[in-house]
Amino acid sequence: MSLRHRNVPSQTGRPSAAESKRALQHHPRQQPPRRPSSLRYPEVRAAAAALKTVGDLRRPPYVQWRPHYDLLDWLALFFGFQKDNVRNQREHMVLHLANAQMRLTPPPDNIDSLDSTVVRRFRRKLLGNYSSWCSYLGRNRTSGSRIGTLIRGGALRWPLLLVWGEAANLRFMPECICYIFHNMASELNKILEDCLDENTGATLSAYSLWENAFLNGVVKPIYETIKAEIDESKNGTEPHCKWRNYDDINEYFWTDRCFSKLKWPLDLGKWVPRN
């Protein structure tokens, strides 16, 4: 029989002092931050680096600009997008572009840089419906000296993804999304050109002065208008001529009336989607 001392587990179910000491010895006090495992792929690093090209863009007012911010953060601070939406769309975009670059045949010479072919194809696919909508209404796609550079660099797709990520049920109305994006791109152009606000005389800064500005100022008002129309159906018991569904309201954005009546910033006070 061994006479050496053995640590007997506590009868109360709690670890003994010796067991606790050993556990602390093997437990690191502070884990160093780890990079996402996806960053070991050069294509992912290239796509993530493409978002960092903020350059000399005018910084959003009233907030402290941090070194790790990228183009999505820049847009969010100007237009008031939700932080979780920005994170989701960043991951969505980086992985989409990285996967597209991985499928290139033959592979690009410089795998650490995002290939221009990948950017062009993604931009053409993403903005396809918006381009068709502009052509149908005879509207020019938003352009400008600074925004033209961003378009060629593929950055104009970023606000469309952020709009989509926050649009909720408005996604059932793709032409409504086009209308929102068109006006946001126009506003973005004015920001890049350092235009002055007609009302205040100050440099235009969109509407990011309050939290969740895009959700509360754009998405929610349109959604509440749609909900009021749907409520008129009384669970589908009323004739369809007395109310409008998503498709009916979306048709409103196929006409120039959305520009003359709905305007921008949104003026929903007198807007009736059936007129």
Image: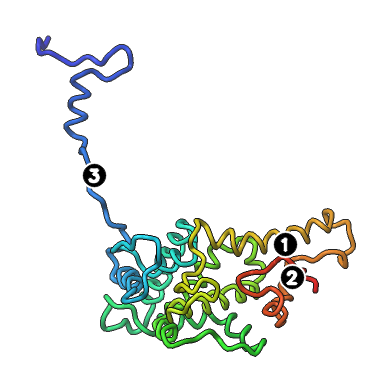
**Based on the displayed image, in which of its 4 quarters is residue 49 positioned?**
bottom left
**Left or right for 197, reference 65:** right
- Amino acid beneath label 2: Ile
Q: Which residue is mark 3?
A: 31
The one nearer the camera, 254 or 195, is 195
Badge 3 amino acid? Gln
Distance between the alpha carbons at the discs numbered 2 and 1: 10 Å
Gap between marks 2 and 3, in whole Å? 53 Å
Name which quarter of the figure residue 78 lies in: bottom left
Q: Verify CB contact (< 8 Å) between mark 2 and mark 1.
A: yes
Three-letter code, disc 1: Thr
Rendered view: 68 above or below 15: below
Tell me what residue is drawn at x 83 percent, y 64 percent.
243
Residue receiving disc 2: 249
Q: Is residue 74 above or below residue 188?
A: above
**In the foreground, 10 or 62:** 62
Q: Is tag 1's residue or tag 3's residue first in the polypeptide sequence?
A: 3
**Residue 231, x across and y down, in percent:** 79, 56
Which-is-in-front pick, marks 2 and 3?
Answer: 2
Q: Which mark is residue 51?
A: none
The image quadrant of residue 113 is bottom left
Query: Do we see residue 177 in this rendering?
Result: yes
Choose between 42 and 245: the one closer to the eye. Answer: 245
User: Which residue, given by chain and number where applicable, does mark 1 sit on?
Assistant: 225
Residue lying at 55% horizontally and 63% vertically, measured from the top left: 214
Residue 172, position in %: x, y? 66, 67
Q: Quadrant of the N terminus?
A: top left
